């Protein structure tokens, strides 16, 4: 079918582009933030890129995502602490706990992240960051994926309108996806 032909051709193109990648040897280190106390169980892993001219720009994008999630959760915990009612066991941070020793399930956050460099093709890198947090309650678990597509040569993040041309790209992408599913 048409969609299968497009998919097969794209695999051949990807293989050829990968061989000619100027940035195929991009390096990164895994950075880690760990915290374990009465209000937080945090283990964040994220990449820090090195060795090319726009590494700092890419690192800022990654940091905004990971550190932004951390800050959002810190704000939530601080709000709970400010509203603390030591006489009400049913409110977040309620009751009389020893804030130095107990892990406060109702007034804490679990935050984790992992990442994977999915591909570097035609001097474009694709990075997947998975963030998972638990902020308490029956529906307190949240996981979300952030994908960064970054042009290593021009030093800019790419978005869907930068990648696809024309107005009918969504229809064509759906056809290819349907074949692969």
Image: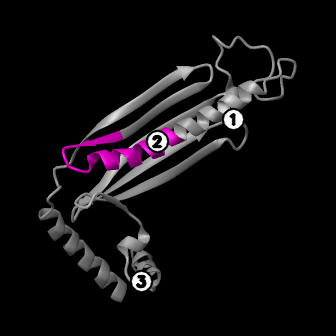
**Residue 174, horizontal then vertical, whole percent:** 46, 79
Give the mark toward the camera: 1 or 2: 2
Residue 47 seen by the camera = yes
Left or right: 104 as drawn, with respect to 153:
right
Residue for badge 3: 172
Q: Quadrant of the N terminus?
A: bottom left
Q: Which mark is residue 66?
A: 2
Q: Main secondary structure of the magenta part?
A: helix
- Residue 113 drawn above or below residue 52: above
Q: Residue at 45% of width from left, 35% of height from top?
A: 44
Using residue 62 as the reference point, say whether residue 24 is left or right of it: left
Comparing labels 2 and 3, the label whose residue is closer to the camera: 2
- Position of residue 41 relative to residue 169, above or below, is above
Instruction: State if disc 3 and disc 2 touch (CB < 8 Å).
Output: no
* Image quadrant occupied by the C terminus: bottom left
**Label 2 neighbour load within 10 Å: few <14, some 14-19, many 20+:** many
Q: Nearer the viewer, residue 108 or 123?
A: 123
Alpha-carbon distance for marks 2 and 3? 33 Å
- What x and y, as percent, mark residue 75? 63, 34
Task: Decide whether residue 65 is among the magenta residues.
Answer: yes
Give the secondary structure at mark 2. helix
Q: Are marks 3 and 1 in contact (CB under 8 Å)?
A: no
Q: Which mark is residue 136?
A: 1
- The residue segment tinted magenta is 47-68
Q: Secondary structure at mark 3?
A: helix
Labels 2 and 3: the sequence-earlier one: 2
Q: CA gap, disc 1 to disc 2?
A: 20 Å
């Amino acid at each position: 079918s048409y969609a299968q032909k497009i998919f097969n051709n794209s695999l051949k193109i990807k293989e050829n582009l990968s061989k000619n990648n100027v940035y195929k040897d991009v390096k990164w280190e895994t950075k880690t933030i760990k915290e374990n106390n009465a209000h937080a169980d945090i283990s964040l892993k994220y990449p820090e890129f090195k060795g090319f001219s726009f590494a700092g720009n890419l690192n800022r994008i990654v940091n905004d995502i990971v550190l932004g999630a951390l800050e959002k959760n810190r704000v939530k915990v601080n709000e709970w602490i400010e509203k603390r009612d030591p006489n009400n066991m049913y409110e977040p941070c309620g009751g009389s706990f020893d804030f130095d020793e107990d892990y406060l399930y109702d007034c804490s956050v679990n935050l984790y992240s992992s990442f994977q460099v999915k591909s570097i093709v035609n001097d474009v890198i694709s990075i997947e960051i998975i963030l998972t947090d638990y902020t308490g309650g029956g529906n307190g678990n949240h996981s979300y994926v952030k994908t960064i597509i970054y042009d290593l040569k021009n030093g800019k993040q790419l978005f869907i309108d930068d990648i696809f041309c024309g107005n009918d790209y969504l229809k064509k992408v759906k056809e290819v996806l349907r074949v692969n599913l």
